Structure formats: C-alpha cells, structure tokens
Image (cartoon, helix red, strand yellow):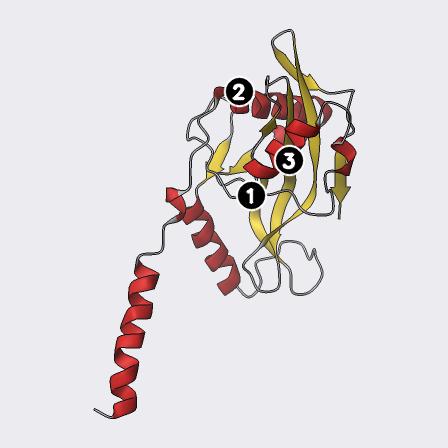
Amino acid sequence: MTRTAALLVPLLMGIALALQVQPAAQTLPIIEDPEAYAVYAALLQNWKKSDPESTRDIRLFQETRQPIARCGEKGFVARGWEPAVENFRQANAHRWLLKTGADLGMPYAMITPPALEELLRAVVQDPAPRRGGGYEPGLRMLPVRYTALSAIGFNADRTFALVGEERHCNRLNDAGDTVLCMQGGITPWEKIGGQWVPSRNADACGWIV
C-alpha cells in the first residue's frame, strides 16, 4: 500500500463512520403540546371554510418548516404581540415533528421524513414526472400536493399564537432537494372563549407564486 493510500484509508473510514452516526430525521423533537394542535385544528377548519375543495384530501409534512423569509414578521409587531413573535422565532429555529395520530378535527394523511426522502429520490430519478405539461423547465411535480406547517409561537399566557403554513407543495427545485410551495403565509390567532379564532388585532402575511 502506498503512503497516500495509507493516509486515505483512515480518513475515508472516519467519513463513513460520521455518516453512519448522523441523527435520523425521526430523532427530531416531537410537538406534544395540546394547545399547539388546537391551533393547527383551528387553522385547518378555517381553511376548510374558505376553500372546502382543497381540504378534501389533506396531506401534511410531518416535519415543520420555517416560514419563508418573504413574509418576515413586520406585520405582527403590534402592541402586545412581541412575546408571541419572539417565541415564534425561537420555536422555528429548528425543525419539529408533528405527533402521529394527533386530532386535527378532520381526516388527513401525513408523510414521514423517510417516506418523503424516498419520494423525492423517485421523482428526481424520473425524467418526466410532470403531469399535463405544467411548470417551467427544470421543476418537477410531486404526485400529490402537500401542506407544510410551522412550529407555533405563543405569548406568555397563551392567548396569542402565530402559525405559518405553506400550501400546494408539489414541486421540486432544480437540484431535486427542496420542495417548493405555491402559496403560504403566517397568521395570528387569539384564544377567545376557549376557542382559537383568527385575530383582528394583528395583520396576517401571505404570498403566492
């Protein structure tokens, strides 16, 4: 064995070992807070009222996604909302997993991180997975549309909440490693009479591509 090869062997073994011990997606913390799921359920019910057709077959990413930067948080800096904004920022500094089987007030299916990774690999390998023409060259379309939710930010007494959502997520970027969504936003919620309702005291932020 040459000196160069002798030096490379332990290096390659170290890299392989490092890859093997990388934490799996399933090791992300799970959202256990019942109040968080009450907000998610209110969000989906509100969505159903405004667009019932889109909620006939709800597919959720099990991993939370940090809302995209184009929304920012400027619309929520209303008096009294600062703690919720800060908690929202902190909660979305890393990813979480939605709890399997959580009651969201309506039927839904959830795709786990390993299943999503397998789906993405299959789409990337398929040279023409798009249906009916569709999007600009380079973008590939997933078989179904998914919805991504953010972690939720609360104020101290848990009467204000901020939640992000991204809908119609069924496209991949050119590299095939990021799911793109057609619309989304961040919405403020207030707990009134024991129920979470859209807030009239802070502005929502929305976007469409």
Image quarter for residue 20?
bottom left
Q: Which amino acid does label 3 sit on?
A: Gly
Count the labels in the image.
3
Q: Is residue 149 in sight in this rendering?
A: no
Q: Earlier in the sequence, mark 2 or mark 1?
A: 2
The numbered mark at residue 38 is none
Q: Is residue 144 in sight in this rendering?
A: yes
The residue furthest top is 193
Spot occupied by residue 172 in the image (x, y as percentages of width and height): 60, 56
- The answer to which of 127 and 21 lies nearer the viewer is 21
The residue furthest bottom is 2
Spot occupied by residue 51 in the image (x, y as percentages of width and height): 71, 28
As helix, strand or loop, the secondary structure at mark 2 comes to: helix
Residue holding disc 1: 93
The numbered mark at residue 164 is 3
Q: Earlier in the sequence, mark 1 or mark 3?
A: 1
- Callout 2: 10 Å neighbours few (<14), some, many (20+)? some
Q: Which amino acid does label 2 sit on?
A: Glu
Q: Is residue 130 left or right of residue 80?
A: left
- Callout 3: 10 Å neighbours few (<14), some, many (20+)? many
Image quarter for residue 91?
top right
At 50% across and 55% down in the image, what residue appears? 120
Spot occupied by residue 161 in the image (x, y as percentages of width and height): 64, 25
Q: In this view, does 3 lie to the left or right of 65?
A: left
Query: How far apart are the alpha carbons under marks 1 and 3?
Result: 13 Å
As helix, strand or loop, the secondary structure at mark 3 comes to: strand
Instruction: Name the quadrant of the N terminus.
Output: bottom left
Q: Is residue 53 above or below residue 138?
A: above
Residue holding disc 2: 35
As helix, strand or loop, the secondary structure at mark 1 comes to: loop
Q: Earlier in the sequence, mark 3 or mark 2?
A: 2
Q: Is residue 128 above or below residue 158?
A: below
